[in-house]
Image (cartoon, coloured by chain):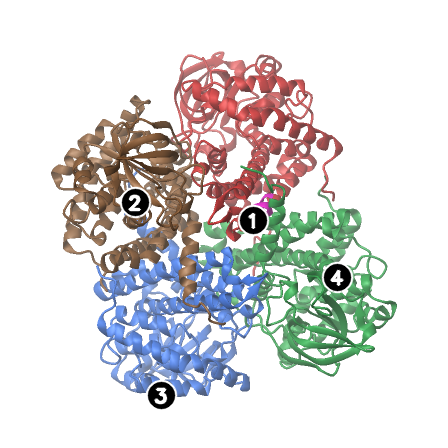
Chain colours: A red, B brown, C blue, D green
Amino acid sequence: MDFAFDEKTEALRTRLLAFMQSHVRPAEAVAEEQARQAPDAWSFPPALRDLQAAARAEGLWNLFLPGEYGAGLSNLQYAPLAEITGHSPVLGPAALNCAAPDTGNMELLALFGSDAQRKEWLEPLLAGEIRSAFAMTEPDVASSDATNIATRIERDGDSYVINGRKWFTSGAMNPACKIMIVMGKTDPSAPRHLQQSQILVPRDTPGVTIRRGMTVFGFDDRDHGGHAEIDFVDARVPATNLIGSEGEGFAMSQARLGPGRIHHCMRLIGMAERALELMCRRVVSRVAFGRPLADQGVIQDWIAESRVRIEQARLLVLKTAWLMDTVGNQGAHTEIQAIKVATPEMAQWVIDRAIQAHGGAGVSQDTPLARLWVAARSLRLADGPDEVHRRSLARRELRRYAGSSS
Amino acid sequence: MDFAFDEKTEALRTRLLAFMQSHVRPAEAVAEEQARQAPDAWSFPPALRDLQAAARAEGLWNLFLPGEYGAGLSNLQYAPLAEITGHSPVLGPAALNCAAPDTGNMELLALFGSDAQRKEWLEPLLAGEIRSAFAMTEPDVASSDATNIATRIERDGDSYVINGRKWFTSGAMNPACKIMIVMGKTDPSAPRHLQQSQILVPRDTPGVTIRRGMTVFGFDDRDHGGHAEIDFVDARVPATNLIGSEGEGFAMSQARLGPGRIHHCMRLIGMAERALELMCRRVVSRVAFGRPLADQGVIQDWIAESRVRIEQARLLVLKTAWLMDTVGNQGAHTEIQAIKVATPEMAQWVIDRAIQAHGGAGVSQDTPLARLWVAARSLRLADGPDEVHRRSLARRELRRYAGSSS
Amino acid sequence: MDFAFDEKTEALRTRLLAFMQSHVRPAEAVAEEQARQAPDAWSFPPALRDLQAAARAEGLWNLFLPGEYGAGLSNLQYAPLAEITGHSPVLGPAALNCAAPDTGNMELLALFGSDAQRKEWLEPLLAGEIRSAFAMTEPDVASSDATNIATRIERDGDSYVINGRKWFTSGAMNPACKIMIVMGKTDPSAPRHLQQSQILVPRDTPGVTIRRGMTVFGFDDRDHGGHAEIDFVDARVPATNLIGSEGEGFAMSQARLGPGRIHHCMRLIGMAERALELMCRRVVSRVAFGRPLADQGVIQDWIAESRVRIEQARLLVLKTAWLMDTVGNQGAHTEIQAIKVATPEMAQWVIDRAIQAHGGAGVSQDTPLARLWVAARSLRLADGPDEVHRRSLARRELRRYAGSSS
Amino acid sequence: MDFAFDEKTEALRTRLLAFMQSHVRPAEAVAEEQARQAPDAWSFPPALRDLQAAARAEGLWNLFLPGEYGAGLSNLQYAPLAEITGHSPVLGPAALNCAAPDTGNMELLALFGSDAQRKEWLEPLLAGEIRSAFAMTEPDVASSDATNIATRIERDGDSYVINGRKWFTSGAMNPACKIMIVMGKTDPSAPRHLQQSQILVPRDTPGVTIRRGMTVFGFDDRDHGGHAEIDFVDARVPATNLIGSEGEGFAMSQARLGPGRIHHCMRLIGMAERALELMCRRVVSRVAFGRPLADQGVIQDWIAESRVRIEQARLLVLKTAWLMDTVGNQGAHTEIQAIKVATPEMAQWVIDRAIQAHGGAGVSQDTPLARLWVAARSLRLADGPDEVHRRSLARRELRRYAGSSS
């Protein structure tokens, strides 16, 4: 057992921390001002382009992707880097071409895409030339139960025809988003986990209508592509757009979830660290009733408890990354669920205290805290609500005792 | 001891519940659509005008105001009505001309205003013809400590000249807002609670600059007048605009806080009830893993616990109202602080569970839940953070034991 | 609505508070010393006899019992008195002949007992000459589900014959306990709520074996009669010992639960007040790191939050008492469940903080805190675990929305 | 970074788990029965002797002690073994001669004892022939602040004379306890952390009076030596009994705390695992309302959350052990405080749910749960209350930002 990062990771951490300090943090205010100037645009702010160019020049690019197409890092090597991008969650991941949902889509294409699919979509995604979306959740059903998915993908000659409604398709409002991976049912009569398929649908396909951007609390997340509600009405794509074979959609979505969740969780830890930093800076400089807030016992309690919770969550995420590397995503299933439950709750707790320590500034646009909080809160729902994961965790735990008596 | 409402209150509750059902709830979607159609307007949506006319016709008008100028209800009689308006917090209170901060401003003018002030500002406010704002909080200091207030109100001949910066001045972005009550220091060298004064400043006074609307978890609350950041640079008003005498500002703000807080708390209870209703409706109709969410033990736990918490908080608020009526705001000081701490936390808890039960819809614009949550969360900061109230409560409790030994 | 106690209640409160101060609190140390001197006795300490005599002389006797046999108070009148006895929970209730389980047993006999039963058992109980026990919970089944009860009560000629095992039969270790009311099934084939009956079983009946005293977090509660595990093997009693008719056992146990729970809850509030008092006394007198604990923000937070929680719980209990008086135990069912869930949790929270403020003394025999905590914790299980009550509460809440859609 | 135990550790874990299964768990009931048979004895139950002999034969002896005198394991190697002993906390650690406070005393003597002191006291302790105690906490002062310690150790010729009162001196009621290490002040006028010394005081020294055993909730912990209150009145020991030099007492107590705390925390994790195991076994076998408790969502929630919390706490403890091994106790100071705060709270949470799942059995002598809970709760106070550690943690965190502005 060894709790030190390996040399490669340490070196990358050092470079990435420097990059965040010199490039990304200073760009936060610039990007926000650009977004304010273009209130109707769903595009990335121009400042992001510059960051991407700089990151690429620094070799901080596609770090998330193992294997030949990406930086070739293990999950355990990438995890602490993802954490650092979370210090600036709007710009950091996108600057390094490591932002969801592109990461999951690129990984899916790398693993399961045909040569033609990789050439047409993976290459421009890896180059940061286009963006993508993943259309899974539906408004009308509890989508955490994949068998509820109602969208149909029906074969018709050399085409598939898609019908259904999706929402919270993140990034799809962005005009730079050119391609969507859509989850739907090719065969509702098949066994429950063989009904689903995934298919590539260009955003400009006739029959695809972007209805509106969903808001999350009061944010429309305009600056990172929003969360679209989309109608698919007889949207037709070539049969070659299917990823893998019919019926493999559920299995592929499971493959995608492991890394996706660990990325989310590591970024959340970075977000919690950012919030703790902001809280500390605030309380040493703010005076009430004659002394700095930092002298108040209740505030100290929040800071200590934040540190204690962050450290615990980080270690569990890192262990999960190590398990994924050593025993595979399936072997790490319990831990992946555990971090999915533990990390958003931890981050939400820390950020909430940081907000409280800031007073009105904490809920406003003048600090990143409100956004951080909303991101953490949303992840208690995204990719399945906590309750679904807890039930699954419990069943696994109980399985050891089946048939036993107390 | 008797836990039944009196007849007058029951009658008003019945009428108000009917009005909410027949007029206000149906107007929610209309008003939201109107707001969407006018994305740049900081005004009330037109639907509100109609509601106000209807409410006035029904005699459901200015219920908050005791004494000759208002409906003459006691705090205990008004409290359950304020709760009902909280079922629809954007439209309900405003429809009845019972929305903050106008309520506090009207009360202040009724109690402390000169005849001329009442004629010029109270009358149109009572008639719902204009709106008002209360400029207290400042960005640069911990405003929960009133001695920190930095805005200056200086006498210069027949005028007062105001300099300072305020923020979170709710309602002041609304063009219908014609008058602001500004808190500042007339004499920084006086004893700590005699330094402050309150003064009427028309919004169009030269030297008054509305800089921007502050957001609250991404919401700009455009449809109820926003939360302005305002610069006062040599803003000059007649000396007769001072409310009461110099140095009475702190005492008047204390007088204002009692009713203001109890109104907030009652509305929060209504908001929690709305959230619980939405949660129940959702879970009986939504199916996951083969059965309604309502059958899941964890969901049942939330519902039961919500009911238990709401009931407790409501009773404490009602008792506080009764104390204010019987022993005065000062005598109810401890309880006022207690409800200020207990109610937002309770409401936040209930609303959070309702959000979780809704999945993505819960955080989006498709339910009122995200807004309700933000309102509850903000009230853990507004009018002083919980921590300030808790400290004050503790000191009062400890005073009984001063000098005692264990 | 009126939050003041009526005159009679106020007068009784004043007298009872004085009695607690002058008699009961000083007797705490005496009784504890007497218990230490008699480590093998399961009897009440002699000091209690004196307290009972004094209470009776003061007219503070059988206050719990409405109607002709008792003091004739309403639930709302008795509730604040029960609270006061909770300040000293080992001695207070017993001093006034208002201790569980005798209270419930006396109430049951008053309501449902035959004349002969009342003469033989109720009279000496009302006089405080004997004690009683209520044998309901069984070790082998989840007794919160009454249909699980396995003890049999079988008719055999002029007798009933009882077989089964009970535990946590509180008070039954005490040699002064002469009579037990036993819950069991007379007809397991009847509809689920008509299977049970209740029967009077003298403690010295052949076939009744007191096996041992159960401990509760290490306490054997020797000084108030312990918690017995009891075997019934062909224990035979006259058929006239049945209370009411066969099959009425479940209904009678429901009748008993309402008052029983409200008494428990009121005492818990008194226990929480005692803990808060102890915490305050401790922190004003104890110095660490150069200043009294009372100056620490975290401690102040506990004190304030304790006050806020106690006030809320008390009001809900009082309202429940009022409902029982005005609409009956059945009409108050929801509230009775709500207080059963809310009050132990509140009390446990407050007492835990008081313990923490006391350091080692808090967990030791030198303060009443550890015992208070155990009492509160146990009540989250006794009379059905919280989870059963929450589920029932939720179902009632959801019933309003059955068939509705979101 | 590597989350696998090394080979040596894995081998020891396997052997220890087998030993717990084959020897320790079966002895639990035996030892408890022996304790019941000897209600007045403060000695270990005879069953422990057999376990110790077996453990020694298996080479599972003194595992806690690094260096030449013990098993020579690192903290990281010992930590998972300490966890396993926590599965049976009354017998497990003592069976392996790894029970507090002997472990800390042996470590102190190994590090700082003179040759003579080691020969006289360390050797029989290592052999398990005698037991020891550590007298630090005092009833009259907040002992978490070492400068409050009031016990005096005064030089008088070739002797030291000790005066003062200690309590919660664990193990000192046991007649096998032959030696105590006493913390006191040799020079109250020295700088605050140079006032204290530690000295060896044989339990039978004239002037040493064992006054009573303190209880912890209702337990007197008779079977592992109780918690003594002790008077020292002119107790005289040879000057050579001083450990180290005058004024080194505080530094030595700090040296002792690191390993002591990590041992406590690891055992707590084992205790939480035991509780979770008991909870799972209970709920799969217990039926209420027609189905096993294991099917209830709320129960599943507890189980999942328990697993999530245990995993996080364990990793933080292991990392702390690794830090102690790699950068020393001082370098691991923050983490040592973090685990001291996090682990008892986690264990208390898990055990509380296990109790709730057991109903009455959970609070009684029929499961180990009540004892486990009390152990976890006590550790939120022992070695300094959580609040002291949190404050210290916060100050360290804030130090990075001193002088910064937000």
Most extreme residue toward the right is D115
Q: CA distance from mark 4 to mark 1?
A: 28 Å
Q: What span is colored magenta in the figure? A: A305-310
Q: Are marks 1 and 2 on the same chain?
A: no
Q: SS for tag 3?
A: helix
Mark 3 Cα shell of 10 Å, populated few (<14), some (14-19), many (≥20): some
Direction from residue D254 to residue A108 in the image, left or right = left
Q: Give the foreground label among 1 and 3.
A: 1
Q: Which residue is mark 1?
A: A305
Q: CA distance from mark 1 to mark 3?
A: 53 Å
Q: Quadrant of residue C158?
A: bottom left
On the question of residue C330 being in view, the answer is yes
Q: SS for tag 1?
A: helix
Q: CA distance from mark 2 to mark 3?
A: 65 Å
Q: Amino acid at mark 1?
A: Glu
Direction from residue B333 to residue D17 in the image, left or right = right
Q: Give the foreground label among 2 and 3.
A: 2
Q: SS for tag 4?
A: helix
Q: Chain of mark 4?
A: D
Direction from residue B292 to residue D181 in the image, left or right = right
In the rendering, which numbered label is found on residue D11? none
Q: Which residue is mark 3?
A: C53
Q: Residue at x 72, y 56 (%)?
A: D81
Q: Amino acid at mark 3?
A: Ala
Q: Are marks 1 and 3 on the same chain?
A: no
Q: Are marks 1 and 3 in contact (CB under 8 Å)?
A: no
In the rendering, which numbered label is found on residue B246? 2
On the question of residue D98 being in view, the answer is no
